[in-house]
Amino acid sequence: MTSKTEKLLSLLNGQPVIPVLKIANVADAVPLARALSRGGLRAIEITLRTADALEAIRRVAAEVEDAVFGAGTILDAKQFDEAAAAGSKFIVSPGITRELLDAAKDSPVPLLPGAITPGEIMAAREAGLRFLKFFPAEQSGGIASLKAFASPLADVKFCPTGGITARNAADYLGLPNVICVGGSWVAPDDLIKAGRWDEIEALAREASKLKT
Ligand code: 3PG
């Protein structure tokens, strides 16, 4: 285990599910983060897929004391730096590039990069990372692929993301090389749009009870 991996794992603090959030309306950021936190999911990933994502991160940073908020869908060093400057506690990327690894190397903010092939996993490992996002999980062999990695790549652990739902999350979490899963199912677009925070809290509460 490297110090960067330890830092990331300590931020996630054993949480079984990391909500992956797409916040279209910045006013939703704080009530959404609060609902998830009340439901037991303090660590959240706010994706940079909407115009106001950085502002959403800033607002959560300023107003939701107990949230551990990361920035997701980071594609290059410029976005890495912007997300870190907005206060992100961790950075998530769908894949792994040399540019991103270099940006992460000199930053105190840990990176959770996506990797799906043995070569990508080995490249991340060489950079000192032992905890990776397995993305897109269901489309990339899912549980069977992760089982195949467990022996040859035994010191690398994963957060499978992509196609994970309440239906299959427990199966992923039962794997020895899976620490947590990521997913959008705990904060569906329609519930966010309608401001149904109690229902999102209930989904989070169910997800938070899953065993890692
Ligand atoms: C994503 O980046 O879109 C995440 O992997 C979420 O995927 P999901 O919507 O299938 O949970």
Image (tube, rainbow, N blue to C red):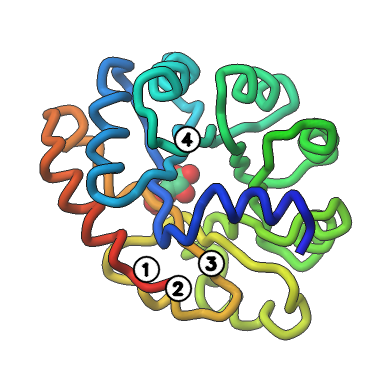
The residue nearer to you, when weighing 122 against 111, is 111
Mark 1 to mark 3 CA distance (whole Å): 11 Å
Give SS at disc 4: strand
The kind of residue tagged 3 is Ile
The kind of residue tagged 1 is Ala
- How crowded pointer 1 is (Cα within 10 Å; few <14, some 14-19, many 20+) is rated as many
Find out whether the residues at labels 2 and 1 contact each other: C-beta distance under 8 Å: yes
The residue that disc 1 covers is 169
Q: Quadrant of the N terminus?
A: bottom right
The residue positioned 84% from the left and 40% from the top of the image is 98
| Mark seen at residue 69 | 4
Mark 4 to mark 1 CA distance (whole Å): 21 Å
The residue nearer to you, when weighing 181 against 42, is 42
The residue that disc 2 covers is 172
Q: Earlier in the sequence, mark 4 or mark 1?
A: 4
Give SS at disc 2: helix
Find out whether the residues at labels 1 and 3 contact each other: C-beta distance under 8 Å: no
Q: Using the rendered view, name the quadrant where residue 101 is placed.
A: top right
- How crowded pointer 3 is (Cα within 10 Å; few <14, some 14-19, many 20+) is rated as many
Q: Quadrant of the C terminus?
A: bottom left
Mark 2 to mark 1 CA distance (whole Å): 5 Å
The kind of residue tagged 2 is Tyr
Q: Earlier in the sequence, mark 2 or mark 3?
A: 2
Describe residue 139's horizontal placement relative to residue 128 as left or right: left
Mark 3 to mark 4 CA distance (whole Å): 18 Å
The residue positioned 52% from the left and 61% from the top of the image is 160
Q: Earlier in the sequence, mark 2 or mark 4?
A: 4
The residue that disc 3 covers is 179
Mark 2 to mark 4 CA distance (whole Å): 23 Å
The residue positioned 25% from the left and 52% from the top of the image is 204
Q: Using the rendered view, name the quadrant where residue 176 is placed.
A: bottom right
